[in-house]
Structure formats: C-alpha cells, structure tokens
Amino acid sequence: MEDAAQQSPSLHMELCDLQADSFMQGKRGKRHLDSEEFWQLVSEQKNPKLNDFALHFYLLISVKKLNSLKHLVRTTVAGSHN
C-alpha cells in the first residue's frame, strides 16, 4: 500500500470534500460512528477513489488479522499436543 502522500490529487480532493460535507459533519456531531456506519454514509458515487482506497486498506488489515488468528490457532493446537 502506498503512503497517503503518494496518492493521487483526486483522492486528496475527495477527502477534502468529504471533510467539508455538511451532511457528514452533522452525522459526526451527533455521536461517534463506528467504521461500518461511517462507510455506509460515504457516497461511493461522489468518492470512488476514497472508497477504493478504504477497501484496499480494509482488506490489508483483514488479511493481517486472519494471519495472526491462524498463527494463534496453530500455536494453541501445537501446544495442546504436548
């Protein structure tokens, strides 16, 4: 995954537009949104690059969590055979 500074200017503009979006500011002010709620509110049509970037980031984190879980299971199973 690329550094955020290396991303396209259009991605930066989508992020700036999202931060300035009055609808999103209203939602943010009412209560804390978890990541799933937040991304359900972000328009995929208005922010295609931001959605794509977020999906890639989410998949990267998910793969790392899955690998950690697999390692934990293997370690636990191997430890129970001793």
Image (spheres, rainbow, N blue to C red):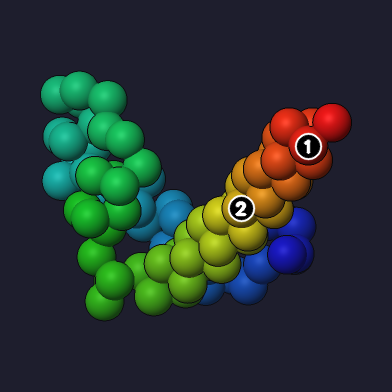
Classify 51 as above or below 67.
below
Neighbours of disc 1 within 10 Å: few (<14), some (14-19), many (20+): few
Residue identifier under label 2? 66
Q: Position of residue 77 (x, y in %)?
A: 71, 41
At a point 47% along the width and 72% down the height, the residue shown is: 52
Q: Position of residue 55 (x, y in %)?
A: 48, 65
Q: Which residue is mark 1?
A: 81
Could you tell me which secondary element the residue under label 2 belongs to?
A: helix
Vertical relation: 61 (above or below) 13: above
Q: Residue at x 75, y 64 (%)?
A: 2
Looking at this view, is 62 or 33 the one in front? 62
**Nearer to the camera, 59 or 4:** 59
SS for callout 1:
loop
- Disc 1 marks which amino acid? His
40 vs 45, nearest the viewer: 40
Are discs 1 and 2 less than 8 Å apart at CB?
Answer: no
Q: Nearer the viewer, mark 1 or mark 2?
A: 1
- Picture mark count: 2
**Distance from label 1 to label 2 (Cα)?**
23 Å
Q: Is residue 57 visible?
A: no
Q: Residue at x 73, y 64 (%)?
A: 1
Amino acid carrying label 2: it is Leu
Q: Determine crowd level at label 2: few under 14, some 14-19, many 20+ residues with C-alpha closer than 10 A.
A: few
> In the visual, does 68 lie left or right of 78?
left
Q: Which picture quadrant has residue 82? A: top right
Residue located 24% across and 44% down the image: 37
Vertical placement of residue 28 versus 61, above or below: above
Q: Locate residue 4, reporting x and y percent.
A: 68, 56
